[in-house]
Each structure stands twice: as C-alpha cells, then as structure tokens.
Image (cartoon, rainbow, N blue to C red):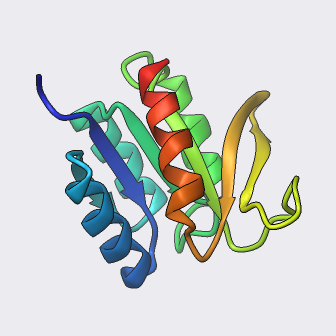
Amino acid sequence: MEPKKILIVDDDDVTLKLLNSRLTSEGFEVHKARTGNEAIEMAAKIVPNLIIMDIILPDIEGSEAISIINDNPATRDVKKIVFMSSIVATDEGSTISEVTVGGSKYSAFSKPINFSDLLPVLKKALDS
C-alpha cells in the first residue's frame, strides 16, 4: 500500500522540520509549502490525502488558501487540519479545538504541536 500523502503548510522552518520528521517516521509521504499560494499549487499537483495548514502565512491567510483548495474539484475532498498560533482549548490542557472556514468545520491545533493530540486526529481523518 502506498503511504498517505500529507501536505504541511507553514512559514516557520522549525514547525516544518518537526512535522516532517515526525510524520515521515510515522510512514507518511510528506510535502511542504511555505505560503498559501504555494500550497494551492502543490495541492493541485500532488492531491494529498490530508493538508495541515497554518492560519497566518506571509501571502494569504490559510483560511483563504483552504477556501481556494475547496473550490477546486480535484482537491475539494482532501482532509484538512488547521494550526493557529493560539486557540482557547475546549478541555483543560487540550490543544485541540475546531474552526469554521467557508462553512466547513476543521480540527484546529495550537502551537507548539502536541503530537499525542495531533496523531490520533490525523489518523482518524485519514481513515474516514
């Protein structure tokens, strides 16, 4: 079976390296983009199984990139997870929340990344 493709979109090199290292070690094929426009182009080219999108990017907001990706029939059904710099957690100590972009709800995570929270959500999204 081919590994699942994940596109990570973040302009922070440390976050990109951390996610790349951890997700590669979990057996995923990882692709990286540093801007929203690069993410839109790459998503159309590789059609990933899942996109991890930062909200604050240097060119366009991550939410705008998600909306554009959702407008493309080839990438509309790609699963998406959103990172934000700060989120009010739903449970004490949790880094998981939910955001609505263009009428669709997405799992959202605060930084720094807590892999014990992220990995189960990521794997569940890929299995659904």
Question: Is 17 positioned to the left or the right of 51 in the image?
Answer: left
What's the residue at 12%, 28% (across, down)?
2
Does 102 appear above or below 22?
above
Residue that extends furthest to the bottom in the rendered view of this protein: 14
What's the residue at 68%, 51% (across, down)?
108
Q: Position of residue 99 (x, y in %)?
A: 78, 45
What's the residue at 41%, 37% (across, down)?
50
**Number of numbered discs on residues:** 0
Q: Position of residue 16 (x, y in %)?
A: 36, 71
Question: Is 52 positioned to the left or the right of 18 in the image?
Answer: right
Question: Is 39 positioned to the left or the right of 31 in the image?
Answer: right
Question: Is 122 positioned to the left or the right of 89 in the image?
Answer: left
Q: Position of residue 122 (x, y in %)?
A: 48, 41
Does 40 appear above or below 56?
above
Residue that extends furthest to the left in the rendered view of this protein: 1
Q: Quadrant of residue 40?
A: top left
Considering depth in this image, is 62 or 88 the residue closer to the camera?
88
In what quadrant of the picture does the N terminus appear? top left
Considering depth in this image, is 104 or 23 the residue closer to the camera?
23
What's the residue at 22%, 36% (across, down)?
46
Q: Position of residue 51 (x, y in %)?
A: 44, 43
